[in-house]
Amino acid sequence: MPVTNTQVVNFLRNKEGLTLSKVEKEAGIPRGMLSKAVSGERELNQDHLAKLYPVLVGYGWKEFYKTKAKVIAVVNHKGGVGKTTTTLNLGRALVLLGHKVLVIDMDSQGNLSQALGVDNPQKQVMHALIDDEPLPVYPIAENFDLSPSDLTLASREIEMIRMVLSELQLQRALEPKLSDYDYILIDCPPALNVFTTSALIAANACMITLQPEISALKGVSGLFEHIFQIQRRLNSGLYIEGVLITMVDHRFNIHRDIIDQVRNQLSAFRIFDTQIRLNVALKESQISQIDIFQYEPTSNGAKDYMNLAKEITR
Ligand code: ADP
Ligand code: MG
């Protein structure tokens, strides 16, 4: 994990019981360096920072900074608007930018899990939601993990609805994972059901995907009202990260007209500068069970999702 001079100085100034000379010795950096850094006389260089980090972890760095993941729910009450494609490829792009990422499949159709090559998972999100087990995590690639689901989730939806405070279960299960990741992306089902509500309660941000169709804005006010209700009642920390327009083809005048309409109607919200273009490689990669960066790294789909990742981390 990259650390900065400012973070280290802040830690050294505020952490009780540290002896600077002892830390210098353990990290193998020149004597007197840390007192100069603390007084602002000198800045620690990359070599010093790299040597210091493991030593400072031993002195409680992580607890001090409480490193916590940013949790983003990808939502829309409609199906086929790019939620799963976005969760998967934005997740992968964030990994390529050096982040550690967990993606969670909250849709009983299990499209995200299948697209990542996990079929009929024995342990799945449902076990954490309904049976109070820890959230299962399957490694997909380095720094990229998945909590999977399949149709079994749908078969137990009624049980979930009958349970006391079931909407809080995902938040509870996610809490111990927050310090393990930089980003956690939750793929929501195409309905404002108990699983979408759970995701919005567990998240600290949400992203809405919209396809530029005539019906794109239909029902969107209901979606926003649902988000606002959750903000008011249960999760005041929930923030609308932005609206992502997907499957755009600029050759169609109608797409341009609809995008203008979206900008007008949703002017109170951030509309991401990055738009995801219609790109058949995205569909093909999903069928081949790999992400777009492995399937066709030079495709428009790969470029667009990388730009989105950069826009989000800026
Ligand atoms: P949702 O999760 O909202 O139901 P998906 O992400 O599964 O939507 O997308 C629906 C379908 O459209 C899938 O077959 C997917 O591969 C395809 N798709 C998604 N985004 C694009 C895109 N930008 N270009 C072409 N096809 C896409
Ligand atoms: Mg989906």
Image: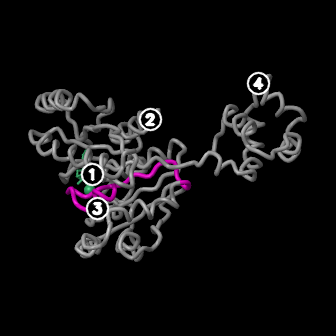
Q: Total of numbered circles in the picture?
A: 4
Circle 1 or circle 4, nearest the eye: 4
Comes first in the chain, label 3 or label 4? 4
Mark 1 vs mark 2, CA separation in Å: 22 Å
Q: Which amino acid type is shown beneath numbered disc 1?
A: Lys
Mark 4 nearby-residue class (10 Å; few <14, some 14–19, many ≥20): few
Mark drawn on residue 310: 2
Magenta includes 181?
yes
Q: Which residue is mark 1?
A: 283
Q: Which amino acid type is shown beneath numbered disc 3?
A: Phe
**In the image, residue 14 lies at what x, y percent?**
72, 39
Mark 3 nearby-residue class (10 Å; few <14, some 14–19, many ≥20): many
Mark drawn on residue 40: 4
Q: Which amino acid type is shown beneath numbered disc 4?
A: Gly
Circle 3 or circle 2, nearest the eye: 3
Q: Is residue 19 left or right of residue 61?
A: right
